[in-house]
Image: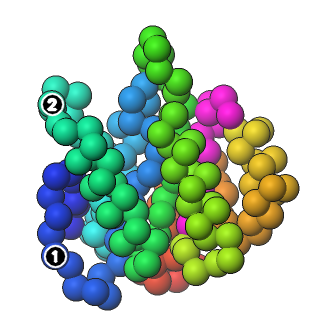
Amino acid sequence: MIIRPPADPVLSPIEPVVFLAGPVTGAEDWQHTAEGLLGSRVSVANPRVPACDTHDYVAHLDWKSRWMRRAALRGCLLFWLAEETTSVPGRAYAQTTRFELGEWLARGRHGGIRFVLGIDDGYTGMRAVLHRLTTAYARADVVVTTDLTDACRRALVACNRVPP
């Protein structure tokens, strides 16, 4: 099942969810590709809404928080740090994603959260993220890959939906 805002379907408590966390504004629609790689095996929470959609920003953030918590409890958080393809004046690229990544790295510092981090080779902050991940957060349990297909496969492994 693909879950997009503002939908809040009721799922079985044991149904794993993969939350697609990562840049939307200024990035290619990598979430669509990830849906195709994951959607037949797990429920996928995709926060991307059409650019023409005039949605309630606060309600959208609350939706994301609910589904990120659900994926953290039963499923996997899949962060994909996509390359910036379109610069948006007055907005730092991936500003919300960077905050959410730090939040979930800190929340999961003592384990218990399934987490996959994918970083596109063209993502300009790759060196800083990798350095902080291995020093300040010391998160050896976080899987890091530079391939979206591999990131999706690893998320399915984390959800026990495919063998390692």
Classify residue 37 as left or right of residue 92.
left
**Circle 2 is placed at which residue position?**
54
Query: Residue at position x 64%, y 78% from top?
Result: 111
Q: Quadrant of the N terminus?
A: bottom left
- Name the amino acid type tagged 1: Val
Quadrant of the rendered image containing residue 64: bottom left
* In the image, residue 129 above or below residue 139: above
The numbered mark at residue 115 is none
Where residue 12 appears, x then y in whole percent? Answer: 22, 85
Q: Tell me if I can see residue 19 in this picture.
A: yes
Q: Identify the residue at horizontal 32%, vertical 48% (top origin).
A: 61
Residue 141 % position (x, y)? 70, 72
Q: Amino acid at mark 2?
A: Thr
Residue furthest right as drawn: 135
On whether residue 42 falls in the magenta region, the answer is no
> Dot 2, crowdedness within 10 Å: few (<14), some or many (≥20)?
few
Secondary element at image label 2 = loop
Question: With 130 as the anchor, is 89 left or right in this view?
Answer: left
Q: Position of residue 133 (x, y in %)?
A: 75, 55
Which of the two labelled residues, at mark 1 and mark 2, occupies the earlier sequence position?
A: 1
| Residue holding disc 1 | 10
Q: Decide if residue 150 is in sight here.
A: no
Query: Residue 164: image x %, image y %?
Result: 58, 79
The magenta span reads: 115-125
Residue at x 52% of width, y 27% of height: 93
In space, the residues marked 1 and 2 are separated at their CA atoms by 25 Å
Of all residues shown, which one is farthest toward the front? 58
